[in-house]
Amino acid sequence: MFHLKKLYIGNLPYSVTGDELEEMFAEFGDIESAVVISDKFSGRSKGFGFVEFADDEAAKAAMEKMDGADVGGRNLKVNEARERR
């Protein structure tokens, strides 16, 4: 079962933090979590993360508006997050 509330954010600049990711998406609605995934050995960002919204409408609006948006010279990829297998 998929929840549109959770979005995958790809092609992030490596300098972006979880707090900055949350700020980028806050205009669309209440955010439950914003996480930038980092390498467990080096601690460096892997260039992607996840944002989870309180409701589907906010997530849908964020996906439509932010997919392809330029952040730090990189075009974001914003999709519905898939369940881990």
Image (cartoon, helix red, strand yellow):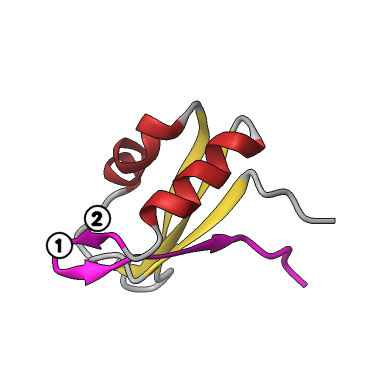
Point out the tag, 2 or 1, that comes first from the N-terminus. Answer: 2
User: Can you identify the residue that label 2 sits on?
Assistant: 16
Where does the image place residue 67, in percent across and percent down from the top left? Answer: 40, 61
Which SS class for mark 1? loop
**Label at residue 52:** none
**Disc 2 packing (10 Å; few <14; some 14–19; many ≥20):** some
Where does the image place residue 20, in percent across and percent down from the top left? Answer: 27, 43
User: Can you identify the residue that label 1 sits on?
Assistant: 72
Nearest the eye: 44 or 82? 82
Question: Along the horizontal axis of the image, is 8 left or right of 80?
Answer: left
Q: Amino acid at mark 1?
A: Gly
* Residue beneath the point at 65% across and 38% down: 56
- Give the residue at the far top of this rendering: 30
Discs 2, 1 touching: Cβ within 8 Å:
yes
Where does the image place residue 48, in percent across and percent down from the top left? Answer: 40, 66
Q: Which residues are magenta?
A: 69-85
Which SS class for mark 2? loop
* Residue beneath the point at 50% across and 42% down: 61
Q: Amino acid at mark 2?
A: Val
Nearest the eye: 40 or 82? 82
Quadrant into which the C terminus falls: bottom right
